[in-house]
Amino acid sequence: MNIWHASAAVERKLTDDLRIVFDTGVDTNTDREANKELVFLITGLIYSPSPNLDLDVGYKIESTDTLRANALLTGITLRR
């Protein structure tokens, strides 16, 4: 089985410290019984209180013909 991922994202600056992001794409469905790949949409906000720190929160919707999953996402990015 080959596993692959394809996506495209756009980002828009709302303020100097805040950005909104939209990411959509498709992933390999690892369920061998499934006939469809997993399609997803993620939307989120990235807050950058300093040049070396990003705090983010997002929401992901993933679906096929028989499955629909939702997830709340959070993250921290530290740069040196």
Image (cartoon, helix red, strand yellow):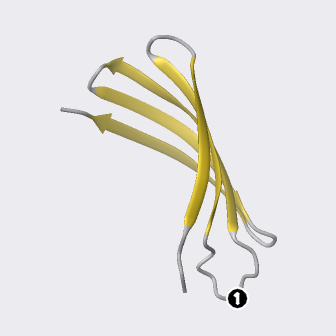
Residue where numbered disc 1 is placed = 33
Image height check: is 32 above or below 76?
below
Q: In this view, does 62 lie above or below 77?
A: below
Q: Residue 62: image x %, image y %?
A: 68, 58
Q: How many marks?
A: 1
- Asked whether, in this view, residue 24 is left or right of residue 53, the answer is right
Q: Within 10 angstroms of label 1, few (less than 14), some, or many (20 or more) residues? A: few
State the image coordinates of residue 44 (x, y, percent, origin top left). 57, 35
13 to the left or right of 22: left
Query: Looking at the image, which residue is at 61% across and 46% down?
Result: 8
| Residue 55 higher or lower than 38, as above or below | above
57 or 4: which is nearer to us?
Answer: 4
Q: Who's the residue at 58% across and 33% down the image?
A: 21
x%, y% of residue 49? 35, 18
Residue at 32% from the left image edge and 37% from the top image edge? 77
Q: Nearer the viewer, residue 25 or 67?
A: 25
Quick check: 53 left or right of 38?
left
- Which residue is located at x 65 percent, y 54 percent? 25
Q: Which quadrant of the figure contains the C terminus?
A: top left
| Residue 48 higher or lower than 33, as above or below | above
Quarter of the image where one finds residue 56: top left
| Mark 1: amino acid | Glu
Which image quarter is the N terminus in?
A: bottom right
Secondary element under disc 1, as helix, strand or loop, is loop
Find residue 52 and report its horizontal and vertical position in percent: 26, 26
The quadrant where residue 38 appears? bottom right
Whether residue 43 appears in this view of the structure is no
